[in-house]
Amino acid sequence: MQVRRATPADARAIAEVHVASWQSAYRGLFPDSVLDNLSVAERERMWAARLVEPATIWVAGPSGQISGFVYACPSRDADTPPPAFGEIAALYVHPAAWGTGCGRALCQAALAHFREAPAQSVIVWALSGNRAARRFYESQGFVTDDGRRDITLFNVTQPEVRFRHNLL
């Protein structure tokens, strides 16, 4: 599994992973009609804009392919302020690459980045109903903390839980 920093040329592949992952991981949590109509082109524009700014995004996959990505940033939560806290804002792996170690490699790249920052802890939010994501983060040493919130996407409100990984 090769992990490298993303470049602007990776925006399309990141968008394809993002859409495919949402369509599989969030099935049953959001309406099928919404998931089936997610736009790779819209996601490509979003990621292209993020890759122009100083972004901390890595991609991973075998033999130069992009099977997943992780987007790391300073924590955006008031009760976990930077620089002590970093955040994994997005970590998605194409469903065809689930179970290959791609997600683990990306998570480890983000954690290594935050250790060098240096940060004391890293947070990540997951939908409460996304059991696979919750198990994944727990397997990477994250534990739930007191962070709870509701997020509304596509006119559907879902509860989220925050996980924390202490680096010290």
Image: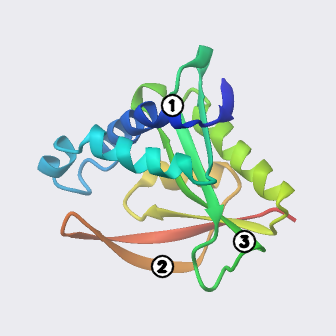
Which amino acid, by three-letter code, is at mark 1?
Ala
* 150 in relation to 24, above or below: below
Mark positioned earlier in the residue sequence (1 or 2): 1
Instruction: Name the front one of labels 1 and 3.
Output: 1
Q: Which residue is mark 2?
A: 148
Nearest the viewer among 55 and 22 is 55
Name the amino acid type tagged 3: Phe
Packing grade of label 3 (10 A; few <14, some 14-19, many >=20) is many
SS category of the residue bearing label 1: helix
- For the point 40% across and 42% down, the residue is 18
Q: Secondary structure at mark 3?
A: strand
- For disc 3, the marked residue is 85
Above or below residue 98? Residue 161 is below
Q: If the image is split into quadrants, where does the N terminus sit?
A: top right
Neighbourhood count class around disc 1 (C-alpha, 10 Å): few under 14, some 14–19, many 20 upward: few
Q: From mark 1 to mark 2, how far is it between C-alphas?
A: 36 Å
In this rendering, is residue 127 above or below 53?
below
Q: Which residue occupies 57% across, 54% down?
A: 53
Residue type at the position of mark 2? Arg
Q: Residue shown at 60%/66% (left/top)? A: 163
In the image, 15: left or right of 4? left
- Residue 109 position in % (x across, y down): 72, 43
